[in-house]
Amino acid sequence: MDRELQYRNAVSHALAGFQLIEEALKDYIGYYHEAVRKLLPSTLTYGSSRRDIQDAALGKLINVFAKSCGNQLLISDLRSLTGTRDELAHKALLDLYGCVQDPADLASRSAELQKTAEQVGELLTVINEETLNVLIAAGLAKASHPRS
């Protein structure tokens, strides 16, 4: 596979991971709203839902997520990756559609993008764990017990 195609694939993989993070945050926030509605006494009204953040950008989603998640390390990691995503997208546009850089640079950038994609994958796992915790706390899911 030539370096440009390898780079293009690495960019696509990393950026798709960020889209998955956005969806995972929307899921968490939506389930959190459901949990609040379920746990509140029926005499109180709570109208927030996933629809409120459906079209929100990553930065906004992280800010909303941070108000309901106690995992400060996850929030910090998500905030630091927001800048990485923006930089990655802009750099990729220049590399792929602007001035052709040294093709050897594309190989090292592909390796960097792979590391970013791995970080994004790890964050997705943690976000999903936090989502499961919300569902379990609200009685919307049951905790699984590891088999011995």
Image: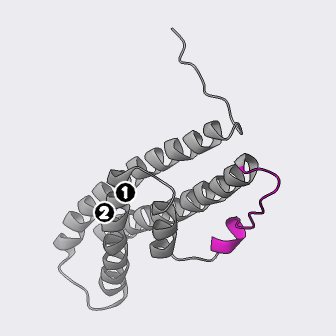
Is any part of residue 105 visible from this angle? yes
Residue on which the image places disc 2: 113
Looking at the image, residue 91 sits to the left or right of residue 21; the answer is: left
Q: Are marks 2 and 1 in contact (CB under 8 Å)?
A: yes
Q: Residue at the location (67% across, 58% down)?
A: 33
The reply to whether the magenta stretch includes residue 43 is yes
Query: Where's residue 128, x and y in %?
Result: 53, 46
Q: Which stretch appears magenta?
A: 40-54
The dominant secondary structure in magenta is loop
Q: Nearer the viewer, residue 104 or 79?
A: 79
- Circle on res. 53: none
> From the viewer's perspective, is residue 79 above or below residue 33?
below
Residue at 48% x, 72% y is: 58
The kind of residue tagged 1 is Ala
* Circle 1 SS class: helix
Q: Is residue 51 left or right of residue 92?
A: right
Which numbered disc covers residue 117?
1
Q: Residue at x 54, y 13 (%)?
A: 147
What's the residue type where badge 2 is placed?
Leu
Give the camera-side residue of 18 and 62: 62
**SS under mark 2:** helix
x%, y% of residue 3? 29, 67
Q: Is residue 2 visible?
A: no
Q: Residues within 10 Å of mark 1 (few under 14, many from 20)?
A: many
